[in-house]
């Protein structure tokens, strides 16, 4: 039998241990460092059985550094029930950004920014080609009655961000 074939199992084992070692180093680099404790997850349940949506096909853009209303994303709805319940907002869009910038989106309820979980999210970063992205926002305690949801957006650096085609979907209590 050939001498290097006899060494093949040792070579495979050595290569595997190198890969495991590299993986351990990478995982170690990704392990959270000691610091403030992570926030506990928000857990809940509700039954938002009614759905309203708006689908906008037109191109929209902004370079605003502050949150502004995104055209074509406003939904008016009546939250049913006798007590507070959740409202879930799903947003998806085809998005492109200028080089070196990020698009940030937020859902507002009755024009109040910051009531959803999460408050805002980085939607896309440094993508000069249109790509589809999606995110959800959860309002955990919305009172019965008339409400308005709208998506706000901004450019993190003031460089143009563009949306072509979007869907905003609100799940609420009947």
Image: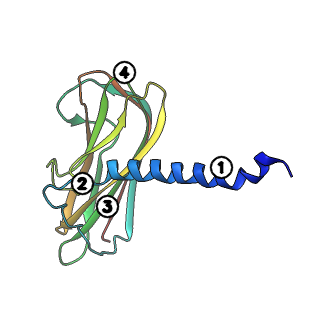
Read off the residue under disc 3: 88
Kindly check if marks 1 and 3 are in contact, taking CB atoms under 8 A apart as contact.
no
Closer to the chain start, of discs 1 and 4, is: 1
Residue 14 spot, x, y in % from top left:
58, 51
For label 1, the residue is: 11
Sequence-first disc among 2 and 3: 3
Helix, strand or loop under label 1:
helix
Q: What is the crowding at mark 3: few (fewer than 14 residues within 10 Å), some, or many (at least 20)?
A: many
How far separated are the C-alphas under marks 1 and 3?
Answer: 54 Å
Dot 2: what SS? loop
Where is 105 relative to 142, above or below? above
Residue lying at the far right in this picture: please name it: 1
The residue identified by callout 2 is: 118
Query: Circle 4 sits on which residue?
Result: 99
Frontmost of labels 4 and 2 is 4
The image shows residue 110 at horizontal and vertical percentages of: 17, 52
């Amino acid at each position: 039998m050939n001498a290097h074939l006899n060494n093949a199992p040792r070579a495979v084992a050595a290569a595997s241990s190198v890969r495991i070692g590299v993986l351990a180093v990478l995982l170690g680099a990704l392990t959270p460092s000691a610091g403030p404790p992570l926030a506990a997850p928000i857990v809940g349940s509700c039954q938002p059985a009614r759905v309203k949506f708006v689908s906008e096909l037109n191109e929209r853009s902004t370079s605003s550094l502050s949150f502004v209303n995104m055209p074509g994303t406003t939904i008016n709805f009546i939250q049913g029930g006798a007590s507070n319940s959740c409202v879930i907002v799903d947003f998806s869009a085809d998005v492109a950004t200028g080089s070196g910038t990020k698009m940030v989106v937020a859902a507002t309820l009755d024009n109040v920014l910051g009531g959803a979980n999460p408050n805002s999210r980085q939607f896309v970063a440094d993508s000069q080609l249109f790509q589809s992205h999606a995110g959800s926002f959860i309002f955990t305690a919305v009172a019965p009655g008339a409400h308005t949801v709208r998506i706000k957006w901004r450019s993190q650096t003031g460089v143009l961000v563009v949306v072509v085609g979007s869907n905003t979907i609100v799940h609420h209590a009947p």
